[in-house]
Amino acid sequence: MNFAIKLLLLCVFCFIPLGAETFTDDFFKIKNGMSQKKEFVKRMLPLIQKANENIFLERKIIDDFFEAFQNGGDLNSIDNKTIEAVQFLAKKYNIDSIQDAKAFKAKVAPVPISLALTQAAVETGWGKSRFFKEAKNAFGQWTYSVTNGLVPAKREEGKTHKIRVFNSVQESVNSYMLNLNRNNAYADFRNLRFLLGSEFDGLTASSKMINYSQTREQYVKLLRNVMINDGLTEYDSL
């Protein structure tokens, strides 16, 4: 696939509507806890896979770019469309230089499926939370926007954060992965992923989620317990 087509696909992923909503009213009518857990995983899984597929596409653009750069010796040997695509990704992932191969490869990489499933389950109570139903927010992401967001019922006095509202759960998944891949709070997560490569799984990744919640070590322990007890580790093999 040439770079022009890849760039077009990249733009499609970023700017067109994200498709029909997966979590429709029938999901929220499920009363049995075990049935809801199974249905939550069934509906969330393809959204996580889709987000990772997008990252794989971005990574292919990056890998091809650095291969061409290495073979050609300088940027003048690379076509403008390719450079534009890489510049777009550098801005997206907060990378200062388009020639920083290590930064790109550390940041533009997939998130373990089991970690994403587990955090979505924990943050939404397996899809039961008001924020998930009303804001399509699967990962408890905050915003400080004056106009966009839902105020948490138990927000501490003096706090101004809100729960971010998304147009779809898919958008929420995409935002979550981008957050892990560029936020300084998750640098240890990215460094370990870069070091371990294909050996980096959800259980390993969970140890680096200490900054995701104010409960810190307790949150990491909770993630590990849910991941193991609910059999979510198996999804890393997909």
Image (spheres, grey):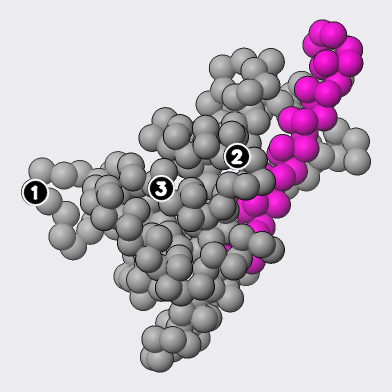
Give, as a three-letter code, the residue at label 1.
Answer: Glu
Q: Is residue 25 above or below residue 155?
A: below
Q: Which residues are magenta?
A: 46-75
In the rendering, at what x and y percent does residue 235 appear? 60, 66
In this rendering, the count of numbered labels is: 3
Pick whichever of labels 3 and 2 is earlier in the sequence.
2
Classified by dominant secondary structure, the portion drawn in magenta counts as helix
Q: Quadrant of the C terminus?
A: bottom right
Residue holding disc 2: 196
Q: Which mark is residue 207?
A: 3
Q: Residues within 10 Å of mark 1 (few under 14, many from 20)?
A: few
Measured as percent of width and height from the top left, residue 98 is found at 67, 18
Gap between marks 1 and 2, in whole Å? 42 Å
Q: Secondary structure at mark 3?
A: loop
Disc 3 crowd rating (10 Å Cα; few below 14, some 14-19, many 20+) is some
Front-most of residues 24 and 69: 69
The CA distance from mark 3 to mark 1 is 31 Å
Q: What residue sits right under mark 1 in the picture?
A: 157
Amino acid residing under circle 2: Leu
**Position of residue 105 measured from the top left corner of the image (x, y, whole percent):** 65, 31
